[in-house]
Amino acid sequence: MSDERTRFANVVLPHLGDAYALARWLARNDSDAEDIVQEACLRAFRGIAGFGNINARGWVLSIVRNTAYTWLKRHRDPKVVAVDSVEEVEPAGVDAGIDWASSPASPEAALIERADAARLEAAIAELPIEFRETLVLREVEGLDYRAIAEITGVPIGTVMSRLARARRRLMVQLGKEEK
């Protein structure tokens, strides 16, 4: 038992941050992401004996991805959209959440930067899930095409296609908002 705990600590624990980030992007909700990661950790612990010294990060993210889809199917009505707070759906106040000390040169620049980040995050959230997960795995998690293909269970060509389509949709969506 302690050998399994040690192996779990060495294989899974270093990747919990990435696991949570992926779950957060897929679930679009902090508390759901925490539940997904917790369930994924249980699955990983049960399967740690079968871990074959492959890419540990990819293995963990595969488990998180599969757990997320199972969890979301079980716990969410597909028509319901979850948000963590009212601020996500209502405009924020001028000073809300801005750290002026570490922000750009002026308050106006900080507001523009924050608005741009929110627009990008909203545009990513609107992508179909297969495009969103591919984009997040590549651009946020920094995985290569082969690792993404292993995690998602699709050929590398499909990964490349999904990534190109996701980027194209983002450009179109962000372009529409500027007009």
Image: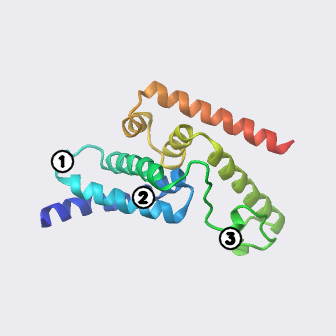
Q: Residue at x 70, y 56 (%)?
A: 118
* 162 lies left or right of 151: right
Asked if the residues shown at circle 2 and circle 1 are in contact, with their CB atoms under 8 angstroms apart, the answer is no
Left or right: 52, with 158 as reference point:
left
Q: Quadrant of the N terminus?
A: bottom left
Can residue 113 be seen in this snapshot? Answer: yes
Q: What residue type is disc 3 on?
A: Ser
Indicate which disc, 1 or 3, sits on the residue closer to the N terminus: 1
> Crowding near pointer 3: few (<14 within 10 Å), some, many (20+)?
few
Measuring from the top left, give residue 84's x and y in whole percent: 61, 65
For mark 1, what is the residue?
Answer: 50
Q: Residue shown at 21%/54% (left/top)?
A: 48
Disc nearest the viewer among 1 and 3: 1
What label sits on residue 126 in the rendered view? none
| Amino acid type for the residue under numbered disc 1 | Gly
Instruction: Report helix, strand or loop for mark 2.
Output: helix
Residue carrying label 2: 36
The quadrant in which residue 10 appears is bottom left
Query: What is the x, y in percent for residue 89?
Result: 72, 61
Residue lying at the far right of the rendered structure: 179
Badge 1: residue crowd in 10 Å (few <14, some 14–19, many ≥20): few
Does the CB distance between marks 1 and 3 fall below 8 Å?
A: no
| Of 139 and 20, the residue lying toward us | 20
User: Element type at marker 3?
Assistant: helix
Which residue matches tag 3?
102
Q: Name which of mark 2 and mark 1 comes first in the sequence.
A: 2
**Amino acid type, residue under disc 2 in the picture:** Ile
